[in-house]
Amino acid sequence: MTDDLQQYLVPQEPYYRAVDDEVSLFEAAYAAKMPVMLKGPTGCGKTRFVEYMAWKLGKPLVTVACNEDMTASDLVGRYLLDADGTRWQDGPLTFAARHGAICYLDEIVEARQDTTVVIHPLTDNRRVLPLEKKGELLRAHEDFHLVISYNPGYQSLMKDLKQSTKQRFGALDFSYPKHGVEVEIVAHEAGVDSAAADKLVSIAERARNLKGHGLDEGISTRMLIHAGSLMARGIAAPAACEMALVSPITDDPDMRDALDAAVGTYF
Ligand code: ADP
């Protein structure tokens, strides 16, 4: 493995608490060369899961945070000018396909549709990537695997993945873990005891009921870990919850009152 590729290996086993049979499903999809879509709200473990799977499979992981300014060239590559003239530089997707890495396109829907379609020939049995500017038809390495994340909550008619893109993937649904599992994760990641983690999860469960009734997204596992991390550093629970759970997700005074009341029930 080249040094360039080596740096993308996940060096240590990431802590990942499996919530269902997602690990064996992903392994089977990897073996079957079936691209995988991780669906679910932000902060519920999708990125951690991919890191864990890359480590478990011993494959390098190339992650791209997609955004609306991203062009196809940002993914595929471009010619650069240097002192010796022009030089082709592989983009992250090409790099992963050429060398056999797992390529994780995070929040793919943020990218423009003309960018998204470049993944199509890689996601069917051709497994090729045409590098038009370079005049090369790249055949993906045996070990190459494509993973995308997708948050169905954010989608609007204007911004959604095309059916022709969606149908190329097998999907794993992620959502907030069950109470006991989420308590375990928060306690582990934030370094708080299970009693405190239990209260934080209970607050989140109440707040999640407000989704669609004034809140766009529920309080995520990530936010609970933030609150717990402040508490583990000596911040009083109400202040930690205010900073990590309430203020970030809403500016609406009524919503803040509702969330404060949920916090007050437990702390
Ligand atoms: P997403 O990619 O879905 O936005 P992340 O994977 O970044 O979310 O998850 C946020 C944090 O929550 C992670 O850094 C990790 O600490 C924690 N987490 C969530 N789910 C799990 C899980 N099942 N096992 C271990 N940690 C988890």
Image (cartoon, rainbow, N blue to C red):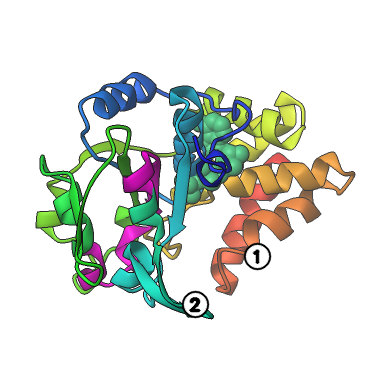
Q: Give the magenta part as a residue range.
A: 96-116
- Mark 2: few, some, or many residues within 10 Å (few <14, many ≥20)? few
Question: Residue at (32%, 68%) from the top-left corner?
Answer: 111
Say left or right for 14 vs 36: right
Q: Amino acid at mark 2?
A: Asp
In this view, 122 is above or below 187 = below
Task: Measure the C-alpha gap from mark 1 to mark 2.
Answer: 53 Å
Say left or right for 117 vs 204: left
Label 2 sits on residue: 84
Q: Amino acid at mark 1?
A: Ser
Q: Is residue 2 visible?
A: yes
Label 1 sits on residue: 247
Q: Quadrant of ligand 1?
A: top right
Count the marks: how many? 2
Q: Nearer the viewer, residue 166 or 116?
A: 116
Taking the magenta stretch, the answer to whether it contains residue 112 is yes
Label 1 residue SS: loop
- Mark 1: few, some, or many residues within 10 Å (few <14, many ≥20)? some
In this view, 61 is above or below 18 = below
Residue 48 % position (x, y): 52, 38
In this view, 14 is above or below 200 = above
Say left or right for 226 vs 113: right
